[in-house]
Amino acid sequence: MKKQWQLVLTAMMFYTRLPVTVSTPYSPELLNRATRYLPLIGWIVAAFMAGILYLFGVIAPHSISILMSIIVGIWITGAFHEDGFADMCDGFGGGWTKEKILEIMKDSRIGTYGMTGLLLLLALKFLSLQALPLSVAILAVVAAQPLSRFVALTVIYTHRYVRENEDSKAKPVSKGIGVQDLLIAAIWGLLPFIGVVIYLQHYMLLFTLLALLPARWYLVHLMQKWIGGYTGDCLGAVQQVAETVIYLCFCILTWKYT
């Protein structure tokens, strides 16, 4: 149990800005094993976002509570996944060879493709959640944060990491994951979503899982076609797109019934 707790703390250290005890050991191998708890990090992010949604939902207009929740989610993760999405937009939008795409994605500066993509993505998140009643918006966040991270993690299982340089920020998770890790991640990733569906008794929401399949397929298709696998930025992009698809599905599937 102590070893598993160390893995959880390691995942928190890498994927969030939340303070973690200094005594927590770190190693690339430990981080690779901690990847199984990436969806659990989604639980933590969702808890903060849902708390802000509820708090501001009492004292401020609905649009403000949604915006504050999104801001808090970005702050907790340090825009880790949003940065990956923007980099992938820049790389795949402006590069025509594997080398050029990887070079652009590694550049810390954001370009036109990245800025445009990120603005549209955030706008779609905001509008999808704003269209929902406060209680349903909270549940959508609870479902989306763990599940979207699980979708990103499946790419680590099915595809290979393509950067060869040792200084890449995602290098520690480049060794892939095993079946056991995937199953553990699936539990953490799917449990909140299934719980929300049962709580709302709105089983049409299960179609969200089907909607995630083409979104994941398209992104993975681009990665495989142009660079032959994934990078850390690609994983961030998958998480962001999956999160947005989940919000959009909640919006489309529930707005007529709430």
Image (tube, grey):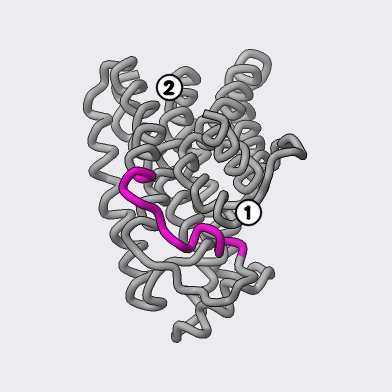
Up the image or down, 53 lies above or below 38; here it is above
Q: Which residue is identified by label 1?
A: 27
Which secondary structure lies at badge 2?
A: helix
**Residue 22 falls left or right of residue 5:** right
Tell whether 69 sits left or right of 240. Answer: right
Residue 241 lies in the magenta-colored region: no
In the displayed structure, 129 sits above or below 54; it is: below
Dot 1: element: loop
Picture residue at 35% right of the left edge, 64% below the top: 159
The residue closer to the viewer here, 251 or 236, is 236
Q: Inspect the image, locate mark 2, and give the three-letter code of the amino acid beneath it.
A: Val
Q: Is residue 37 or residue 129 the one in the foreground?
A: 37
Q: Is residue 125 above or below residue 253?
A: below
Foreground mark, 2 or 1, reads 1
Q: Residue furthest front?
A: 2
The percent position of residue 157, horizontal first and vertical second, equals: 35, 56
Q: Which residue is mark 2?
A: 136
Image coordinates for residue 154, horizontal then vertical, percent: 35, 51
- Quarter of the image where one finds residue 73: top right
N-terminal of the pair, mark 2 or mark 1, is 1
Tell me what residue is drawn at x 29 percent, y 31 percent: 253
36 w.r.t. 197: above or below: below
Residue at horizontal 41 percent and vertical 33 percent from the top: 188
At 23% across and 43% down in the image, what residue appears? 210
Label 2–label 1 contact, CB within 8 A? no
- On-image quarter of the C terminus: top left
User: Where residue 13 sits: x, y (%)?
Assistant: 66, 44
Residue bounds of the magenta highlight:
169-182
* Crowding near the residue tagged with mark 2, few <14, some 14–19, many ≥20 C-alpha atoms within 10 Å: some
| Tag 1: amino acid | Ser
Could you tell me how far apart the alpha carbons at marks 2 and 1 are, in whole angstroms? 40 Å
